[in-house]
Image (tube, grey):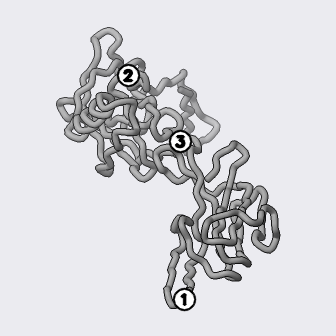
């Protein structure tokens, strides 16, 4: 709202001012579709829908409080990533979820109550959206049944769930020739059952994952190891904290292991919260 002042071009001293002019929103042109707050893997979230005019104003007159809810068709567009059954409490919950997502991909009709141009699909609703993989980038589209008004969300960013596991990965490509047998390891591979030549270095990085195997990122951990000197796996010496073997042993995401004895070595990495491997 505001006032409009009119001034004579040839004589600026002559002017007039209108009374207060109130500018209201225009007719509904499109829907704005967006999640409310952050979206975390494995958790349902609120979905907000707003009726906007061409200028982007919320059309407060788009209100169903007296006329009853309006039916909208809701579509989901995303990578076809089907979460495994062990992501759910039981097989029935898994089936319910996958059936719901299939309905959204085809277009699911839902009744919405608009209040002053805004409506929502609550996280507690049985039809609420839930995604499990940070790579999905799903897009949600809504439209009226007569196709006059529609709207599409931006790709939704799925954030990892809380930390559930930690593993050590190679920080470089390495290979060793031991007795004529070549052992190759690649950057990013998990450090597991590795054969390394004594005196060579093994550079590792600790990374965290949520319960759905989404990468959280590098983590500071406490590194330690114990070594064995015989084929029977008997521990004959403890190298925990020995700088000959570890370049960084405490509160670091990276370490370098350089064994000086043949045998077996077991590498332990533990976060301050107790996750270890």
Q: Position of residue 159 (x, y in %)?
A: 51, 45
Residue under numbered circle 1: 179
Q: Position of residue 194 (x, y in %)?
A: 56, 71
Residue at image location 38% in from the left, 26% down from the top: 121
Q: Is residue 182 left or right of residue 75?
A: right
Residue at image location 69% in from the left, 65% down from the top: 254
Marked residue nearer the N-terminal end (3 or 2): 2
Disc 1 to disc 3, C-alpha distance: 45 Å
Marked residue nearer the N-terminal end (1 or 3): 3
Direction left: furthest residue: 146
Direction top: furthest residue: 66
Residue under numbered circle 3: 161
Residue at image location 71% in from the left, 62% down from the top: 225
Pick the residue in front: 236 or 109. Answer: 236
Callout 1 crowding tier (Cα within 10 Å): few <14, some 14–19, many ≥20: few
Nearer to us of marks 3 and 2 is 3
Callout 2 crowding tier (Cα within 10 Å): few <14, some 14–19, many ≥20: few
Residue under numbered circle 2: 125
Q: Is residue 89 left or right of residue 265?
A: left
């Amino acid at each position: 709202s505001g006032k409009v002042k009119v001034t004579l071009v040839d004589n600026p001293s002559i002017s007039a001012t209108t009374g207060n002019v109130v500018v209201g929103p225009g007719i509904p042109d499109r829907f704005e579709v967006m999640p409310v707050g952050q979206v975390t893997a494995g958790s349902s979230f609120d979905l907000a829908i707003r009726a906007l005019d061409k200028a982007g104003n919320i059309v407060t007159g788009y209100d169903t409080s007296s006329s009853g809810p309006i039916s909208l068709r809701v579509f989901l567009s995303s990578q076809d990533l089907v979460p495994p059954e062990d992501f759910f409490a039981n097989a029935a919950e898994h089936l319910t979820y996958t059936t719901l997502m299939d309905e959204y991909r085809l277009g699911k009709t839902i009744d919405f109550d608009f209040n002053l141009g805004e409506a929502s699909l609550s996280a507690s609703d049985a039809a609420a959206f839930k995604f499990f993989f940070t790579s999905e980038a799903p897009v949600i589209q809504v439209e009226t049944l007569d196709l006059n008004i529609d709207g599409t969300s931006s790709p939704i960013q799925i954030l990892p769930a809380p930390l559930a596991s930690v593993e050590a990965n190679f920080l470089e490509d390495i290979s060793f020739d031991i007795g004529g047998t070549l052992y190759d390891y690649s950057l990013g591979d998990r450090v597991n059952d590795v054969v390394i030549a004594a005196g060579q270095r093994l550079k590792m990085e600790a990374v965290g994952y949520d319960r759905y195997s989404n990468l959280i990122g590098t983590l500071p951990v406490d590194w330690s190891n114990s070594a064995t000197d015989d084929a029977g796996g008997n521990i004959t010496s403890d190298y925990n904290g020995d700088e000959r073997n570890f370049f960084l042993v405490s509160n670091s995401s990276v370490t370098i292991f350089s064994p000086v004895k043949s045998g077996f070595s077991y590498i332990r990495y533990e976060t301050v919260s107790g996750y270890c491997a």
